[in-house]
Image: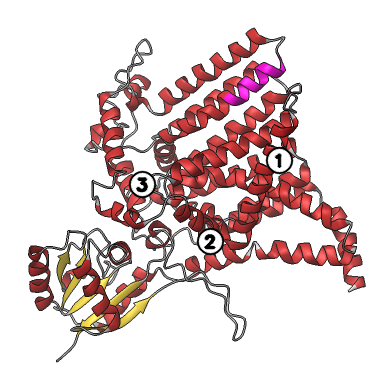
């Protein structure tokens, strides 16, 4: 053991911070790029599928003025048959341009460009996290924060999807980095880059507006600390606003009514889309994908998903303690300044600003009706930063109480725990998607001409494969989200008499309805009869893909995520169950 530690001591001093960061980025790139074709070209992510359809409908404009004109632009989704479009257009436009340049522009290719860019932006986020940690804390904290974010599960999962979340998070973290720079060296050029970054964030997702108070708070702090330069700092604030508006206008021109820079009136269609989107975040709407939120508890539900699945249990617990520590630091500071002169260092202020951002978004979004895990992604980088600072302080405390050998072994084992969740999650991408596996089983085991029952608002199976086509089967569809009425069950019972097999492509319907006993008593009884085998249908096949570490002999570590938030499982590793009507 002593000889081993000596070798470690000889080796590690040669690892410069840049080399360690490079190794972290290499690990992060593997986790994000491995298995990028996880659905074998089947377009199984519904939001990604929609964006891909929009992408292929768009075309590059002939002139810059045509690009800006919301009425005629071929890059405006509203002009291409998509009147309801609430995503930011910056990721869409960047992917379109990259697809045209690489000749990966058709429906079966463009989403790969989008997925690659999604992963690339998340990798860039890791680099910015390092830079922030280095400036606010120290180089060790920057490296550790980069490692922690690289190890979080949700960022690596979303990097496999062509969506806007990783783009949004990158620009918000980049905006915070420019704010960090301004606290130490106030330059108007930096305020301009801050404005551009924030404008691009808005063009990824309009919810970036929530980050506005963070920017304003940072600039007000600078104004207080540099009271001798009020005109310059006020000019900087104006610069941020101006360049934010300019960047947003150039990257999402469809949000404005005209192409003229002399008019900044918001496009009425843009406003209508946002209002319509807001209606879906309402328990009275009963929009099928929103049924899942009816039985969820504010704050507790997103907290559980963040700790267990979004971050991963070991790191999730660490993140919670780091937040409690940061809150204690804030309270201690508040008590210490009572009746005294207000003195707050820039680094301490930025630390508290990150804390306010985390708590503000978590408690606001966590108390909303819709609690999608991806909505919380913008706080993950800041959780990594606070957790890194917290862990380094714990290590400093242990350094005086443990021997060097014990400290080294303890820290190494503890940090290795953080890799269990991301590495186990990679098993999902190391095997065929469950819907693909189920489709192959159907073609091999169910004879042509059989009648299959699939559920609406889910991907029906079997999928069309290169050598097989689902048209060889007769398909029936049931709408399980409808209220339990005699009419609903009269129709479903007549369909059940016709079908030979029932296919549950995921837990979308039963995962939502079985939590609502007062609303869906008959639906629950129906699903229970399927799962217990007490009815006319018996389970004949089940396909699942839980996050698992590789088998080590007889030992295997798997995590059953059936109870995770719906979108965490139903896109890239849903559980598929097939039932056959009993012969008797």
Q: Is residue 170 magenta?
A: no
Crowding at label 2, few (<14), some or many (≥20) Cα neighbours within 10 Å? Answer: many
User: Could you say which is closer to the camera, residue 111 or residue 358?
Assistant: 358
Count of numbered circles in the view: 3
Instruction: State how far apart marks 1 and 2 are (Cα).
Output: 26 Å
Res 1 quadrant in image: bottom right
Residue beneath label 1, please?
Answer: 329
Say if mark 3 contacts mark 2, CB within 8 Å. no
Crowding at label 3, few (<14), some or many (≥20) Cα neighbours within 10 Å? Answer: some
- Report the residue that reaches farthest toward the front: 339
Which region of the structure is painted magenta? 217-226
Relative to 115, does residue 185 appear above or below in the rendering?
Answer: above
Look at the magenta stretch and give its main secondary structure.
helix
Relative to 221, does residue 435 appear above or below in the rendering?
Answer: below
Residue beneath label 3, please?
Answer: 369
User: Could you say which is closer to the camera, residue 241 or residue 525?
Assistant: 525
User: Which numbered disc, 3 or 2, marks the residue closer to the eye?
Assistant: 3
User: Could you say which is closer to the camera, residue 13 or residue 464?
Assistant: 13
Q: Secondary structure at mark 1?
A: helix
Mark 3 or mark 2, earlier in chain = 2
Residue beneath label 2, please?
Answer: 308
């Amino acid at each position: 053991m002593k000889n081993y530690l000596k070798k470690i001591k000889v080796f590690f001093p040669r690892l410069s911070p840049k080399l360690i960061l490079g190794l972290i980025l290499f690990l992060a790139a593997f986790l994000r790029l491995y298995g990028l074709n996880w659905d074998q070209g089947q377009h199984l992510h519904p939001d990604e599928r929609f964006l891909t359809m929009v992408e292929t409908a768009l075309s590059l404009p002939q002139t810059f003025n045509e690009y800006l004109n919301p009425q005629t632009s071929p890059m405006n989704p509203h002009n291409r048959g998509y009147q309801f479009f609430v995503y930011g257009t910056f990721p869409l436009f960047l992917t379109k341009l990259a697809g045209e340049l690489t000749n990966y522009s058709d429906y079966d290719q463009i989403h790969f460009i989008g997925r690659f860019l999604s992963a690339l932006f998340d990798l860039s986020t890791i680099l910015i996290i390092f830079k922030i940690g280095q400036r606010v804390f120290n180089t060790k904290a920057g490296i550790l924060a980069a490692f922690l974010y690289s190890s979080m599960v949700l960022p690596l999962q979303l990097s496999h999807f062509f969506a806007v979340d990783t783009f949004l998070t990158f620009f918000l973290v980049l905006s915070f980095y420019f704010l960090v720079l301004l606290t130490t060296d106030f330059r108007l050029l930096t305020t301009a880059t801050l404005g551009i970054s924030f404008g691009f964030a808005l063009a990824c997702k309009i919810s970036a507006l929530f980050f506005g108070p963070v920017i304003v708070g940072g600039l007000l702090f600078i104004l207080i600390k540099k009271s001798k330069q009020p005109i310059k700092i006020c000019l900087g604030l104006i610069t941020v606003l101006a360049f934010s508006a300019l960047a947003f206008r150039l990257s999402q021109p469809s949000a404005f009514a005209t192409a003229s820079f002399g008019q900044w009136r918001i496009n009425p269609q843009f406003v209508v889309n946002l209002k319509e989107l807001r209606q879906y975040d309402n328990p009275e709407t009963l929009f099928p994908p929103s049924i899942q939120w009816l039985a969820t508890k504010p704050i507790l539900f997103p907290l559980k998903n963040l700790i267990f699945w979004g971050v991963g249990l070991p790191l999730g617990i660490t993140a919670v303690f780091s937040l409690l520590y940061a809150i204690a630091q804030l309270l201690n500071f508040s008590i210490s300044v009572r009746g005294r002169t207000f003195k707050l260092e820039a680094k301490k202020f930025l630390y508290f600003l990150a804390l306010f951002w985390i708590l503000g978004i978590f408690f606001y979004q966590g108390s909303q009706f819709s609690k999608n895990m991806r909505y919380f992604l913008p706080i993950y980088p800041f959780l990594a930063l606070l957790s890194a600072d917290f862990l380094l302080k714990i290590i400093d405390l242990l350094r005086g109480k443990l021997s060097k050998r014990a400290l080294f072994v303890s820290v190494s084992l503890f940090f290795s725990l953080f890799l269990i969740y991301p590495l186990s999650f990679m098993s999902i991408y190391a095997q065929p998607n469950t819907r693909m596996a189920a489709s192959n089983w159907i073609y091999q085991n169910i004879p042509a001409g059989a009648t299959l029952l699939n559920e609406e608002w889910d991907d029906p199976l079997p999928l069309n494969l290169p050598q097989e086509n689902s048209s060889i089967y007769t398909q029936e569809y049931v709408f399980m989200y409808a209220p339990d009425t005699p009419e609903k069950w009269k129709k479903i019972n007549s369909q059940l008499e016709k079908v030979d097999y029932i296919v549950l492509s995921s837990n979308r319907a039963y995962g939502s309805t079985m939590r609502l006993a007062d609303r869906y008593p008959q639906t629950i009884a129906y699903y229970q009869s399927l799962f217990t085998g007490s009815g006319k249908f018996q389970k004949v096949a089940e396909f699942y893909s839980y996050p698992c570490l590789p088998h080590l002999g007889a030992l295997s570590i798997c995590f059953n995520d059936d109870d995770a938030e719906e979108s965490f499982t139903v896109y890239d590793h849903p559980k598929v169950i097939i039932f056959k009507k009993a012969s008797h």
